[in-house]
Image (cartoon, helix red, strand yellow):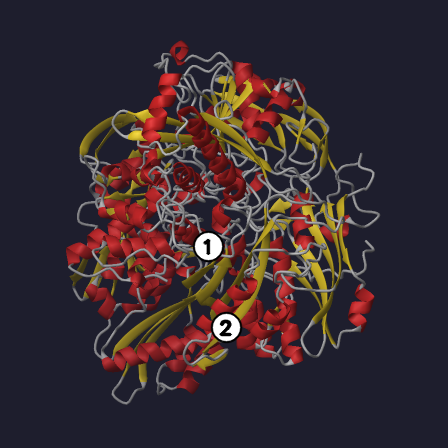
């Protein structure tokens, strides 16, 4: 311990702290300045950036004593006396805040630039921003809004870029920042790791480290004996069910007999500190009998493959999913031209910038027992008493967390409470259980609050990834350009546990003919268990994969037919009256043609050329279209409940709160719900507050997945508000009375101004029934302008023109952010991202080995909104969360083909392989970056 | 999975003089090590790639060693000088252009704001960008230890991949210097990367050359990495160039000779052997041409500050 003296946010601090501290630790732990966030502890993601003597540094690897005597500025210093710093204001205005976990880092890095330029009397340019923020990552926004915000904050007149939308109502259709944006830009927003409960312990998990093995024995005695260790738990200590899962309960809470992937949990430790917990892990002895591992979906299908779950009747087959429409043999007989190609897509990582964190609080917890302060009125948080086992977690599915945790504890679901904290990005990666059950077990075992924060490296190892797939697809068309048949076989690597594989790969299968009117379709998909990391939900949910294959084939067919690629798509695009591959007749809200028209018109504006050369650089446009269901579909009950309470504030007039346990992970749901309630009640948007994700206070909104929340929870909120309004009308007896009058009347009469509405989405039918599998689809078209360096094979996306049919834009500001962010995420899918596993062990074991797009990858984006209202969505809206990240990769590879004559059969594009093909005059590249083996040969026709 | 150690050191010193730094290292007798910006070192320690030490001796805050100066015909950089300082220094942009270019592509801005050229050289990676730039310029480094200080050529400081002849447990790299380019001299650097999860260059190359009035190359240095265990001074290629008139053909020949003088490796997920070779064939002539342009126009415009 030694004295550390610094000026932090204009205040002199003098601390007695260990010299081994990093600056980030001093800020967060010793000074409680938790606005500085930690994303990786590797100096990779940049979200922990602060200013030291005015210069941005990454605080996670900055030795604290290096800052001895220095002036340190954090996000907390920016707003003074309630007035926002121009950067903060600009981030609000431009919707540059989504999940918010990177926002402090982006703002502080930008402040370094803006201050430096101001001091030099120079303007800030977009190039300057690209250089300054190169290593400060954001997974949500796609950076366009960030760039515009910084330009505005530097004093330039840069208004928010809002898409044209249909006329707004009083609240619906108006661009507003998300409700939590202000807390996020000031650093006061609390994510799970920002909570510190009195008496809290720290937990770590013993991971398998081997991909497939039988457990002979587990010896925790040495770990238990270590000073500072409060509990070490194994499978024997799980009182209830030791298996959890979102669809199939096959995932052990703690493994007892066998481990099936390297990230499997074998034991958990709670200790006084993370360091002690980590030391205890080293003392746990697990004796394994290693088993042969199966690490590839096609190999898993072989009869002699090692079995991941021996007890299963179907071997490693998790699910065979089929789509059959018409007669493909007849369809191909009618085709003049056929393209038959096999593609491969990689496993990818969500790389949400907030690693998983859960805090368990035991039933009966009172902070006063640990010298903490207790606020008798607090219903949640560090100062509250807790009468139930409670888990604080940034989760996408609070109620399923609750039910799965309760099952493991062996108690009734309502004996457990989940409190959703702010979530630093999810994208599907926070649907499965990670630490929720573990902290609940440890909290009850120790009778103390227990925090389990995953390191970035552990996060990479453990949570489910996007399915790697091999897709063979055969597409036939007539000479006139009409599609006649699609036949496809997909293999999806489901990894060690079921997670959402069945659902994800069903979506890949049902969307495998693309958003086209195809009379004859046969698709077989084999979801396979392997000893890789489990695969699960990831924005696009299987459709991102099949779209790459579908849209590559479409360009190949167009070329063979001598048709314009856009015209060929237009000729076959789904429209009202068309029948999807699953036999669903589309009756409304099919804006695909308009999306294609808008993109096409923009792309061809001026001296249009599909491709051209400038020296050693080639440029070309590529185009792709996509669609994605809104909601769970397939016959699953799809419902959401919301509660709306209205009251009269003596100063502010009527106020409302809407409560539902759907999740906000940056997508902007609170603002959508508030707009619906405000619109319905006729009160200002600002008069509505939103409480999300506390299972004791909020009714079940269902999972935040499948682009469904705007639709289902938006409807639930709207209808609950309508119910309240009707109650008030009935009580007042005079609908023309003002809301204030009605509320006064209701209060006087003792009538409740609260209603809960359980909204059921239109019924859907199971796959194979031929009925309506989904109640709505979103449609989109995107064109990508790419630049290929013919010397290096490097690919840059220079421009994206996009059009998305969203039904209705509820909040154009957050909608624009969803679209830009989704597009840039899919640029990563095309060009940079691959979660590489070698014999079941991740090569991608550190953030430095997983590059998501940086600000330097973000192209110019023109985004059109198409609004073909749905009759059942709130104000006509349908889902948008996933749609933008579906067609971009194919648009890019189609552009690469047009520029170079080389077709990419796998992702992400490898510049080395591309250059080799260009120089050799080859017409295709089989290997993606990270691939060592050729694409397996896959048969068509449903035989495994 | 093993847990990254969080206590990578117990004591952290920020000495203000070289003597103090050397004395601390002696006192700890091998249990302390020098840290510069720490941007590589800390990450590597956290990943368990180095043994933890008892003490860190921070060389970045020694008085007088945080500036770029001109002394006795040299541009002199103290060990506290960061990449960002170099990238913005007008003298280096103009008269050590390849160093400004090479430092501008290191890491991201936050890393360049803290990381030092001294640390880059002492780290001795086969393709440390700053090192490649300084090597082409004919840079020298000053090392201080218990027996006093000595200057050595940068190329003499490498022992193996990531291994320097400087004993970082007992010695401090205190200063770096090079002779700035003068009349009819120019320099240039280029690096090829990939956008995926690998932070190491596929190839990093720098050249310095001097022309006479007839465009004959009178002096040149070419540095490359990674083409072997340590940053490479491509002497066979240099010999091809010296005494000959600058031309595209000559530069292509130099690239071929440079390639034939090394055994390029394929590195998994990073680059195939053929790709690396192709990048040398493409970009070594290109940076030679750029250096010639700079030598003949006396205009050094570096390629931006950080791509």
Mark 1: few/some/many CA within 10 Å (<14, 14-19, 20+): many
- Mark 2 / mark 1, whichever is N-terminal: 2
Q: Where is residue A617? Give x, y as percent.
A: 45, 77
Q: Residue furthest bottom?
A: B214
Considering only vertical position in the picture, is A176 above or below A423?
below
**Is A540 rendered above or below residue A276?**
below
Q: Is residue A260 left or right of residue B56?
A: right
Nearer mark to the viewer, of 2 and 1: 1
Q: Nearer the viewer, residue A517 or A415?
A: A517
Residue count near mark 2 (Cα–Cα under 10 Å), binned few <14, some 14–19, many ≥20? many
Q: Which mark is residue A819?
A: 1
Residue A728, image x and y in percent? Answer: 42, 27
Relative depth, front residue between A880 and A729: A729
Residue identifier under label 2: A621
Nearer to the camera, A535 or B187: A535
Q: Nearer the viewer, residue A334 or A275?
A: A334
Q: Residue at x 56, y 33 (%)?
A: A434
Residue located 39% across and 38% down the image: A678
View extreme (top): residue: A369
**Residue depicted at x 50% and y 54%:** A806
Instruction: Give the x, y percent position of residue B165.
Output: 39, 52
Pinpoint residue B183: horizontal percent, then vertical percent: 21, 78
- Label 1's element? helix
Instruction: In the rendered structure, find residue A55 and report the number of the disc placed on it.
Output: none
* CA distance for labels 2 and 1: 20 Å
From the viewer's perspective, tell me whether residue B252 is left or right of residue A339: left
Quick check: can you spot residue A633? yes
Q: Chain of mark 1?
A: A
- Quarter of the rendering occupied by the N terminus of chain A: top left
Residue A189: tell me if it is visible: no
């Amino acid at each position: 311990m030694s004295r550390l003296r610094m000026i932090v946010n204009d205040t002199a601090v003098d601390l007695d702290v260990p010299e081994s501290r990093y600056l980030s630790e001093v800020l967060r732990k010793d000074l409680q300045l938790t606005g500085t966030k930690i994303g990786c502890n590797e100096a990779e993601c940049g979200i922990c950036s602060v200013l030291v003597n005015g210069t941005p540094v990454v605080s996670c690897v900055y030795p604290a004593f290096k800052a001895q005597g220095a002036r340190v500025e954090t996000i907390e210093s920016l707003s003074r006396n309630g007035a926002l710093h121009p950067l903060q204001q600009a981030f609000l205005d431009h919707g540059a805040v989504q999940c918010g976990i990177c926002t402090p880092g982006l703002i502080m890095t930008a402040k370094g630039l803006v201050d430096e330029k101001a001091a030099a009397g120079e303007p800030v340019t977009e190039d300057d921003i690209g250089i300054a923020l190169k290593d400060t990552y954001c997974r949500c926004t796609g950076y366009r809004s960030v760039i515009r915000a910084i330009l505005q904050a530097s004093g330039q007149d840069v208004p928010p870029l809002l898409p044209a939308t249909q006329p707004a109502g009083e609240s619906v259709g108006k661009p507003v920042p998300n409700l939590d944006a202000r807390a996020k830009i000031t650093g006061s927003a609390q994510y799970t790791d920002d909570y510190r409960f009195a008496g809290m312990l720290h937990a770590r998990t013993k991971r398998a480290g081997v991909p497939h093995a039988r457990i002979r024995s587990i010896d925790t005695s040495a770990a238990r004996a270590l000073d500072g260790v409060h509990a070490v738990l194994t499978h024997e200590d799980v009182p209830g069910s030791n298996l959890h899962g979102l669809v199939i309960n096959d995932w052990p809470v703690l493994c007892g007999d066998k481990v099936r992937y390297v990230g499997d949990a074998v034991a958990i430790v709670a200790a006084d500190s993370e360091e002690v917990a980590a030391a205890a892990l080293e003392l746990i002895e697990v004796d394994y009998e290693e088993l042969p591992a199966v690490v590839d979906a096609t190999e898993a299908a072989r009869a002699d493959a090692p079995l991941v779950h021996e007890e299963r009747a179907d071997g490693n087959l998790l699910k065979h999913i089929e789509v059959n429409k018409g007669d493909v043999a007849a369809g191909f007989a009618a085709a003049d031209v056929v393209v038959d190609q096999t593609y491969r897509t990689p496993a990818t990582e969500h790389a949400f910038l907030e690693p998983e964190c859960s805090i368990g609080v035991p039933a009966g917890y009172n902070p006063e027992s640990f010298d903490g302060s207790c606020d008798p009125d607090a219903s949640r948080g560090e100062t509250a008493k807790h009468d139930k086992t409670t888990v604080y977690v940034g989760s996408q599915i609070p109620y399923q967390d609750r039910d799965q945790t309760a099952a493991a504890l062996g108690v009734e679901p309502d004996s457990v409470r989940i409190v959703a904290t702010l979530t630093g990005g999810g994208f599907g990666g926070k649907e499965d259980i990670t630490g929720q059950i573990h902290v609940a077990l440890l909290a009850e075992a120790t009778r103390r609050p227990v925090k389990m924060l995953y390191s970035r490296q552990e996060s990479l190892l453990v949570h489910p990834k996007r399915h790697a797939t091999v897709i063979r697809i055969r597409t036939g068309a007539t000479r006139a350009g009409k599609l006649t048949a699609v036949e496809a076989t997909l293999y999806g690597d489901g990894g060690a546990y079921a997670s959402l594989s069945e659902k994800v790969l069903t979506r890949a299968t049902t969307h495998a003919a693309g958003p086209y009117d195809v009379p004859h379709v046969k698709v077989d998909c084999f979801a396979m268990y392997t000893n890789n990391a489990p695969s699960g939900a990831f924005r696009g949910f299987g459709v991102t994969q099949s779209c790459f294959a579908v849209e590559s084939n479409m360009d190949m067919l167009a070329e063979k037919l001598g048709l314009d690629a856009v015209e060929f798509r237009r000729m076959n695009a789904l429209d009202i009256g068309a029948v999807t591959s699953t036999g669903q007749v589309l009756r409304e809200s099919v804006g695909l043609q308009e999306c294609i028209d808008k993109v096409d018109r923009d792309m061809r504006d001026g001296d249009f050329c599909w491709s051209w050369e400038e020296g050693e650089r080639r440029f070309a446009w590529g185009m792709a279209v996509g669609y994605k269901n809104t909601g769970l579909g397939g016959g699953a009950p799809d419902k959401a409940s919301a509660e709306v309470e209205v009251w009269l504030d003596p100063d502010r007039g009527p106020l409302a709160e809407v409560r539902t346990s759907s999740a906000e992970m940056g997508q902007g749901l609170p603002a959508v719900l508030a707009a619906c309630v405000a619109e319905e009640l006729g009160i200002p948007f600002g008069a509505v507050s939103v409480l999300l994700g506390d299972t004791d206070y909020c009714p079940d909104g269902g999972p935040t997945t499948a682009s469904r929340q705007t639709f289902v929870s938006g409807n639930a909120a709207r209808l609950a508000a309508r119910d309240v309004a009707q109650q008030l009308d009935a009580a007042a007896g005079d609908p023309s009375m003002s809301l204030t009058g009605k509320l006064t009347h209701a209060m006087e009469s003792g009538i409740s101004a609260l209603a809960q509405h359980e909204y059921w989405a239109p019924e859907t039918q199971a796959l194979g029934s031929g009925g309506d599998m989904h109640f709505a689809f979103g449609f989109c078209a995107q064109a990508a302008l790419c630049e290929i360096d013919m010397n290096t094979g490097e690919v840059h996306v220079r421009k994206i023109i996009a059009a998305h049919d969203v039904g209705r834009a509820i909040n154009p500001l957050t909608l624009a952010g969803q679209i830009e962010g989704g597009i840039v995420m899919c640029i990563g899918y095309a060009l940079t991202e691959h979660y590489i596993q070698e014999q079941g062990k991740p090569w991608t074991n550190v953030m430095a080995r997983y590059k998501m797009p940086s600000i330097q990858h973000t192209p110019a984006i023109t985004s059109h909104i198409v609004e073909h209202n749905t009759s059942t969505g709130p104000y006509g809206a349908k889902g948008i969360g996933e749609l933008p990240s579906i067609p971009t990769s194919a648009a890019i590879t189609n552009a690469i083909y047009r520029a170079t004559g080389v077709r990419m059969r796998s992702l992400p594009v490898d510049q080395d392989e591309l250059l080799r093909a260009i120089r050799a005059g080859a017409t295709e590249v089989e290997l993606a970056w990270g691939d060592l083996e050729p694409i397996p040969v896959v048969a068509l026709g449903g035989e495994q | 999975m093993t847990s990254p150690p969080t206590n990578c050191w117990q004591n952290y010193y920020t000495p203000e003089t070289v003597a103090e730094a050397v004395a601390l290292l002696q006192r700890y007798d091998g249990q302390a090590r020098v840290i510069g910006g720490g941007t590589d070192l800390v990450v590597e320690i956290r990943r368990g790639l180095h043994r933890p030490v008892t003490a860190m001796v921070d060389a970045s805050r020694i008085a007088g060693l945080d500036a770029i100066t001109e002394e006795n015909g040299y541009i002199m950089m103290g060990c506290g000088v960061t990449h960002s300082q170099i990238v913005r220094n007008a003298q280096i942009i103009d008269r050590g252009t390849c160093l400004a270019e090479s430092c501008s592509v290191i890491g991201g801005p936050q890393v360049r704001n803290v990381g030092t050229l001294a640390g880059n050289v002492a780290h001795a990676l086969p393709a440390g960008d700053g090192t490649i730039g300084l090597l082409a310029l004919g840079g020298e480094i000053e090392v201080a230890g218990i027996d006093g200080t000595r200057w050595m050529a940068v190329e003499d400081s490498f022992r193996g991949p990531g291994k320097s002849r400087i004993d970082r447990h007992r010695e401090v790299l205190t200063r770096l210097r090079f002779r700035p380019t003068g009349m009819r001299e120019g320099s240039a650097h280029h690096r090829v990367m990939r956008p995926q999860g690998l932070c190491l260059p596929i190839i990093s190359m720098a050249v310095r050359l001097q022309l006479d009035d007839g465009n004959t190359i009178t002096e040149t240095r070419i540095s490359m990495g990674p083409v072997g265990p340590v940053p490479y001074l491509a002497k066979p290629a240099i010999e091809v160039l010296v005494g000959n008139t600058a031309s595209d053909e000559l530069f292509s020949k130099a690239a071929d000779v440079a390639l034939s003088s090394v055994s390029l490796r394929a590195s998994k997920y990073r680059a195939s052997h053929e790709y690396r070779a192709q990048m040398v064939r493409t970009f070594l002539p290109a940076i030679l041409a750029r250096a010639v342009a700079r030598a003949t126009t006396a205009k050094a415009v570096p390629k931006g500050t950080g791509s």
